[in-house]
Amino acid sequence: MTPVIQLQNIHKSYGATLVLKGIDLSVSPGQIVGYIGPNGAGKSTTIKILIGMLPDFDGEARVLGMDVKTQSLDIKRRIGYVPENAALYDTLTPMEYLQFIGQLYELDPTHIDRKALDLLRLFQLNDYANARMTTFSKGMRQKVLLISGLLHNPDVIFLDEPLSGLDANAVVLVKEIIRQLAGSGKTIFYSSHIMEVVEKISDRIIIINQGQIVADGTFAELQHQRPESLEQLFAQLTGSDGQTGVAEEFIHTLNN
Amino acid sequence: MTTLILWLLDRIQPLFRALGADYGQLRAIVQVKLMMDNRRNIVSLGRYGKPSAENNNSFMRILLIYTIVGGVISLGMLAIPPQKSLFLPLTLQFSYIMALCAMTLISDFSSVILDSSDNQIILPRPVGNRTLWLARVVHITSYLFGIALSLSVGGILIVGYRFGPLAGLMFLALSLLSAVLMVFLTNLFYLVLMRFINEEKLREVINYFQILMAVLFYGGYQLLPRLISSQGSISRIIDHQWWHYLIPPMWMAATVDLFIKPVLDVHHLVFAILALLMPVAGLWFMNRFLTTDFTQKLSGIDSESRPEATTSSAQQPQSGQASWLEQLSTWVTTEPLERAAFAFTWRVTGRDRKFKLKTYPQLGFGLAYVVAMSFQGGSLGSSGFFYLFALYFAGLYVMVAQYQLGISDNYKASWIYGSAPIQAPGDVLVGALKALILKLLLPFYVILASYILYRYGLDKISDVLLAFSNSLVMLISSALLSTRYMPFSVAPDALKQNNTARGLLTSLILAVIGFSHYGLTFIPYGVWVATPLSMGIFFLLLQHYKKTAWSAIEMG
């Protein structure tokens, strides 16, 4: 089977600082890939390269068999992206926003209307479909953002912290949606800081640290390396072992 | 207005397709942008962004003012001179239009041009660089066309009436082309900046450019009509020099001139070709070569503003600065809380770009205005009264800074005032005000005073001191009279425009104090006696301000 995502020896630097130092990666269809790493490890940069937002990198990146550097528009048409920091035009209403996004994908307006309304209803936002998003909570925005990333029924979905701000019920719902999307043959590539979630829903976990992949495999495979939780493995691999000691010192400093 | 713009866009659809954009997407982006402009209290549009209901009322009001101002100027310049000598007045007309367009672009629309919020929302979608870039240009140009049109509508009517509809139409077309040309030049300007300056510095540099431009243009506003009236001979026929071909307003003027006279010589023809060709060529050039670069650079802006670890070497000057600031704050403040607010305000006013952008141009303009006025040979500038007028007039501009002190984009961080056990909020207010006085008012007055002393003689020192002290009194009075906000605690668009009345009152009081001061200059040693008195009042009021209780403070 041809891989859906393929990265070969990706290097990317901002000015003088090297952010990605040779990422090699290949993902087959229907996989849920959890992409984790500490802050500033290069997670978002990798995702931005994959969705064609950062064309100036070294190495080869292919999504759905297409070259990211030359065919980014064709790729963008078939992928969905949900950014992390709830970036949306919040002076619009959800319907207006989704209508706008749909137009960017050149979808049929009446079709978008119906679909968007249905999706909003499923997320229990139908009462707010025509209210401006300035007053929305982070969870409500995140729901709109998720819909806007999935509206055009993409084949590959990139999610950056997809569960942030959602309440417990919505988390369960979104996790189930992710699972069923993968079940129907779509590929999910997402990054998160919440280890429990990554542990539970990922078919495959990739840990990066300082621009390099330090672990890659199913959770079961990774457990061979270190049999406790993913959290501990993560701490060990990203060089932040011994947090208990740091916490003790923290308390000690507070008391002074 | 949105509907009108979209209707116009629909009419010229083929143009966008020819330029390589996806029209459906372009229309969607422009529509959403205009819709959002109407809704939010357009902070990004600077002066135009006053709170308004579901419409562009404030922008319309600005346009109306421009129409009137433009009409009056056109009437003065274009109605009288004979057919033969309209070239220079026309040049001035177009200079005016171009200058205002450029000013608007740089000071009010730079945040639109350099808007990186699109990055997260539009760039991941299948939208081509060219489409996105053209959508931006259309969005901005629709505002610029409004400005250019309202400025020139008077001129168009006059020229059309005097020299026939063809000349009027030409004037109209060239006004719009002027706006396009300015879009091109501004884009080019930003791109050149982006090429030579790294992204982190870019916004900083643009900020200073904005401040500088604002000062220059505010000054230009004042100077231009004066220059014209003093010259008196604007209707003379000027000889063509080679460098005239480098001045865009002359291209436009000559093209209109060509239809007015009508005349067809080499000069006019070259000018006309330049006028018609350059904006189009500029658009084509931008579309062809600059778009990819621009969007790429833009998407870089976000990601490259990574935090820089301040390690050993970088920390050295930082701590040095901190220590002298601390030293200064211990001299001028009494309470620890006041000291904290002083240092806090000092730092934020030095770093918050929005604050700088809102206050520095005002101060710069205050200075520019005073200098410009003093050089004007006429009545006011040379009277013995003028330097006093200048001193007090300048005081008005500092009030703006005081008003800005409550505003911040990071207003949400003001929860800290609520959660911290602050007993005397007056300490915070006074600390912030002191920082403002030392950081802005004092240097401003020093510059102003040096100029006044240099120009009007050293013996005016007593007047400068009294005026300074009186300005302090005014500043504190205005702080006492207006709604009190904690420093940087209010959203930029939350402050309603009810300060017009207050501003009027303040200037009235300022005038009264100024005249009293003028009266004092006739009494021997009057000014010297009044100064300590005024200082006394200032400190009394400051004590009063310091006693501000929580109940008197409005949280944003």
Image (cartoon, coloured by chain):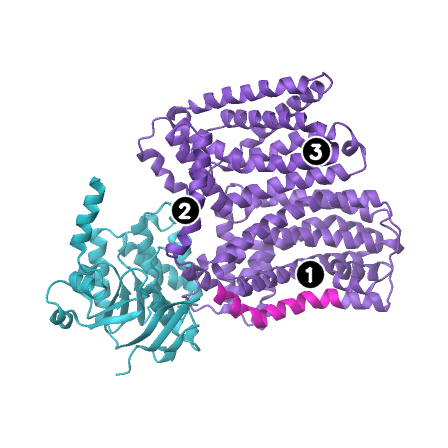
Chain colours: A cyan, B purple
Say which residue label 2 marks: B319
Q: Residues within 10 Å of mark 3 (few under 14, many from 20)?
A: some
Q: Amino acid at mark 1?
A: Leu
Say which residue label 1 marks: B177
Q: Residues within 10 Å of mark 1 (few under 14, many from 20)?
A: many
Give the Cα separation between the discs numbered 1 and 3: 47 Å
Q: Residues within 10 Å of mark 2 (few under 14, many from 20)?
A: few
The answer to whether the residue labelled 1 contacts the one labelled 2, judged by CB atoms less than 8 Å apart, is no
Residue at point 81%, 68% (across, down): B269
Q: Nearer the viewer, residue B527 or A108?
A: B527
Up-down: is B412 above or below B476? below
Name which quarter of the figure residue B375 lies in. Answer: top right
Query: Residue B477: percent from the left, percent from the top?
Result: 53, 24
The disc numbered 3 marks a residue on which chain?
A: B
Query: Residue B27: percent from the left, percent from the top?
Result: 52, 62
Camera sees residue B384: yes
Residue at point 74%, 67% (across, down): B274
Per the rendering, the mark at residue B346 is none
User: Do the dots labelled 1 and 2 sit on one chain?
Assistant: yes
**SS type, badge 3:** helix
Q: Magenta residues, as a range?
A: B274-297
Residue B269 sits inside the magenta stretch: no
Q: Amino acid at mark 2?
A: Ser
**SS type, badge 2:** helix
Query: Residue B423: percent from the left, percent from the top?
Result: 34, 26
Q: Nearer the viewer, residue B104 or B452?
A: B452
Per the rendering, the mark at residue B453 is 3
